[in-house]
Amino acid sequence: MNILTLLVVIPALTILGLIFTKGYKQARVLSAIGMGLQFVATLYLVYMYFQARGAGNTDAFLFDQNLVWYKSLNIHYHVAIDGIGVLMILLTSVVTFAGVFASWEVKDLTKEFFIFLIMLAMGVFGFFIAQDLFTMFVFYEIAVIPMYVLIGIWGTGPKEYSAMKLTLMLMGGSALLLVALLGIYFNSETATGLHTFDMQELSKMHFPFAFQKFFFPFAFVGFGVLGALFPFHTWSPDGHASAPTAVSMLHAGVLMKLGSYGAFRVAMYLMPEGAVYFANFFLVLTGFSVIYGAFVAVRKTDLKFINAYSSVSHVGLILFALMMFTKTAFTGAILQMISHGLMTAMFFGLIGMIYGRTHTREIYKMGGLMKILPVISATYVIAGLASLGLPGLSGFVAEMNIFVGAWENPNLLNRVFSVIAISAIVVTAVYILRVVGVLLMGPLKNPEHANLPKVKWFERVVIILLMGSIVGMGTMPLWITDTIRDSLIPIMEKFVH
Amino acid sequence: MIQGIGVTDFFIISTLMFFIGVYGFITRKNLITILIAIELILNAVAINFVIINKYLYPEGLHGQIFSIFIIAVAAAEVAIAIAIVIDFYRTNKSVNVDESEMMKY
Amino acid sequence: MDWSYTIWIPLLPLIGFLIIGFVGRKLPYPIPGLIGITGIFGALVLSYITAYKYFFVVNADMTFEPIKAVETLWMTFSDKLHFNMGVLLDPISVMMLVVVTTVSFLVHLYSLGYMKGDPGFGRFFTFLSLFTFSMLGLVIATNLFQIYFFWELVGVSSYLLIGFYYEKPSAILASKKAFIVTRFADFFFLIGILVISYYTETFDFLTLNGMSESALASAGSTSFMGMSVLALGLTLAFVGGAGKSAMFPLHIWLPDAMEGPTPVSALIHAATMVVAGVFLVARLFPMYYHVDGGIVLSIIAFVGASSSLIAAIIATTQMDIKRVLAFSTMSQIGYMMLSLGVSGYDGHHGLGYTASMFHLFTHAFFKSLLFLAAGSIIHAVHSNYMTKMGGLRKHLPITHITFLLASLAISGIYPFAGFFSKDAILDAAHMHSPIYFWIGWFVAGLTAFYMFRLYFRIFWYEDREYHHTPHESPLTMTVPLMILALLSVVSGFIFFYILPFGTYITPTGEEFHMHIDWTLAGLSLAIAVVGIFIAWFMYFKKNNKAEKVANSFGMLYKWAYNKFYIDEIYMFVTKKIMFGVVSAGWMWFDTKIVDGSMNLIGNTTVKTSYAIKKLQSGKMQDYVLAVVVGAVALGAIFIYIWTR
């Protein structure tokens, strides 16, 4: 079987198996096995990919599989992958595997929880490998819809409100997106006279400028809603705050990347002239959202809200980098997707661990946790440092690529917004250190917290998986940057005029 | 073909019957009355079929057959309707149509 | 010659960091310390070998060519810009290696005694090793980005070590402040790097420094706000250096950083990390000199001079001995900056550069000695305030002597180390402009005054009763003191007469002869003696002269005591304006306007649906009525259309 299809089949089989499990123990073990297999399959994919590249295969996309799905409309199940996709799959696999362990102690409706969680993951995997816009859209919806159930049932706080808001806003984005996809479809021409959804074929066509000008905003904003594009980001804080730990991890870690990835691979790749036409407009929006998210995070007191706004800032940086149209900035954008995915998953995982013990997320109700939960606290500090761009951790690699790339665009407006975006590193330091200072340092504030249970083995798994990836990416970035740069070559051709 | 009575006169009768039926259907609150109003409407239609057949297409029998069909349907309909009304009465202790809005939400 | 072993100089402390961090933290005393010391000792030995080989074997002909010992690609930015990691050996980096490893080793040794019994013993050595690794990585950096990489790492190590006593609220605040202020400066540094690298298309120090004046002029031909872009980039880079080196007005973090354990203050906030800014300017000195005719250097000189003056004035009023030393550090670094700023390029004109490096070298020894001695005092008395001290010479004999020697050294008394380096700086300043000389001269007097104020107040003044009789510190603490005292006494002498700095470390690599201009030296000696005499007069015996003098200065004293209210201004801007107004305003905007408009759309939909729900009465008759009315209306319309 094609290795990429395997990445969709394993979660599907796991879901099927979960239906027949009894009790929470069976369910979680089966999920861990399934996602473990997925993780192994991903590592094998990475190995295969580099072997193929090492053997001199220079095709843009590898492991191609193209099956006719619905003939009269020319819809195909078409999967293939390039270096960027491999990295995104790797990210998804790590986060999903960690997510299963982070939800090890979900006790009510465990089976159903894991079914929806893995369905979400399946959608994400499918999205990253799809080469057919229709297939891609189907997987996109598979990934988004389970969120409603997961937040609505297993969430905390005003979960119905959050679930509704999140789903409705994302559906709004999907609607815009669908308009764009159909627009592309009906304006495509192939040799056989049929329209096509196939991205590889579409990328060879040149759409008229008027068409791009009209449809680019639809596609970009449609994906942008999921990528927390200002001012459509407000689902994210509420959604994350109410979502259970693993869902927050998966959602902020990989699902939001679907937005930025799609904005890049579909909107900008297929409609480069439209992208250039709207560049300044979106540059202002995204550049502003970088500093804006950081400043709002400074004032928030709920851990998840702080992290959600920090995500708005960091994810804003991805879209910001995309608006620079330089290879380095694009590399940085992809790196930031991966880096932010790992960091934010780590953060939400840790917040879940802390919340599971103290049953509060208000930072001022806690304090001095460093002494009681040394492992979790130390990891929180390291994750925080990664988030503010400490060298040797993943954030630095991504941010520096973005900043250097941003500076390569010599327009004055780009320069001005680059400076604004870079200034966010200072504000980031402020809110990260504020949390560390209030939450972890200082004397123990709440005496009830003196006997919190120590870190458990499955929590260690989460920490090791994610922290290992963050440090690995931060200390050995060369192979990642080179993989991305190689895969960017065909994309860059679109932007050279 | 009835001497001295034109097709228009029959139409006037059937139209009157039809609108009396409609009026009754809309204004009455009692389900039984509504049922009677529906009978009026159906019969108005049946008259129309017969008359049009007789006056305009005397060589065919389609209209006659249709009116017999309508009578049969009306009979079946009344049977079902009465059953519904009785059931409705059992649950609501009334045959007032105003009280049948629980499916609204 | 094979230099590739030099990579182990930073790697050994890194390995120490990893071992202690992962497995060694919970080990019993003193194992984590010993692991750390082993790592730094290895680095020390390698550094000394490197220094010997570099200065006396390879470059015996006195050319001092820079050597790229190791260089490897770490990350690709673009086709032109690569992020390399490597080891650059040239006179200043080799000198820095010696300084950093020596002081770090002695501080490690000292901490073994000082931190004994602290529950965070292992953690302390973890962070200390991390710092040493980062600092060594910084001084051997081959390019701008590598220096930025380690620049951030030293910042974080400093943050972790200042906040070492993490249960103390003041330590948390101080660590946060230190990190954020330096981070703010680093923001400028980063933009500076981006600007410089964009226009010169390289990060590499050797390429940057090797560019001729005309090449620089053409690379930076774009001008921005009256400066060429390269001058602007270098100014921004200097802002980063000023932040790390606690130059006015970015110095506010340094006094607070004294919340950290004293060995940390000695290592990071006196001898090594805070001179990183000076090192950065020295590293890019040829470029600074050649861009726009050295316009940036005049900014540096001004900032250095004003910082050194302000810090010296504040130092005379402080009561916390570590804060006095912190301001003294700031003042001395101001000297170094001033010296770089007034320096010329070739021959004897390069004296300022040489003097700056010389002062950095000697200052590292006597200032870390002062801090370690202060640590020993604090260890004995359990207080930072000089009002709680007095007459300690009887209780702490070794500390007393070493402290005295260090004070003499920093005051610039012949033949102690500080005399030679400070005299060279004043000489260089005088060559450039008399104003800077007189400022430096005045600061020299202030320095002597506040140092001996400290000395007399701690060790003489009064014989007082202590709760616990102070005891001299254990050998692990006093041996480093003695070694540093020896260095403070002789390092100036040796490196002026026997191995003169001017031979080894100059901007161009050509040697020149340093000599003492006795007119200037006499002036500075005279004011130092006057300063010491005033201190003796005021603090030798218990009296109230100090209060009288303070009162006679009135407002000025109050201002200086409150550090000219610079902290308050910063707090107002950040707390009140940035986070009170901007941040809160944006949060309001976010919840009320952005999110509000989303909720508005949702609510409007819901309300509309409630409004039109009424049509759905559930009454069959209503629907039929609607159907009939509709049918009739439609019929009427159709008939009207057909019959028209």
Image (cartoon, rainbow, N blue to C red):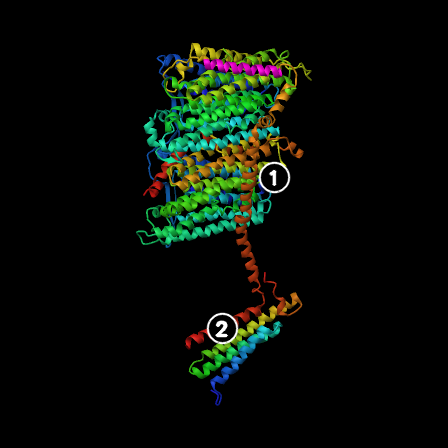
Q: Which residue is mark 2?
A: C633
Image point 54% across, 79% down: which residue?
B17
Residue farthest along the bottom direction in this orientation: B4
**C220 vs A489, nearest the viewer:** C220
Q: Quadrant of residue A84?
A: top left
> What amino acid is labelled 2 in the image?
Ala
Where in the figure is residue A400, as x and y percent of width and height?
43, 34
Where in the figure is residue C361, as x and y percent of width and height?
47, 17
Horizontal relation, residue A135 to residue C557: left or right:
left
Is residue C522 highlighted in magenta?
A: yes
Image point 44% across, 74% down: which residue?
C638
Quarter of the image containing the C terminus of chain B?
bottom right
Q: Quadrant of residue C433?
A: top left
Where in the figure is residue C501, as x and y percent of width and height?
42, 14
Where in the figure is residue C407, as x and y percent of width and height?
55, 15
Please give the chain letter of the residue carrying mark 2.
C
Q: Are marks 2 and 1 in contact (CB under 8 Å)?
A: no
Q: Which residues are magenta?
A: C519-539
Foreground mark, 2 or 1? 1
Is residue A455 highlighted in magenta?
A: no
Q: Which residue is mark 1?
A: A362
Horizontal relation, residue A441 to residue A292: left or right:
right
Q: Same chain for the residues at labels 2 and 1, yes or no?
A: no
Q: Secondary structure at mark 1?
A: loop
**C366 vs A324, nearest the viewer:** C366
Image: B13 above or below C527: below
Evaluate whether residue A245 shows in this view. no
Image: C579 above or below C444: below
Assign the magenta stretch its main secondary structure: helix
Q: Secondary structure at mark 2?
A: helix
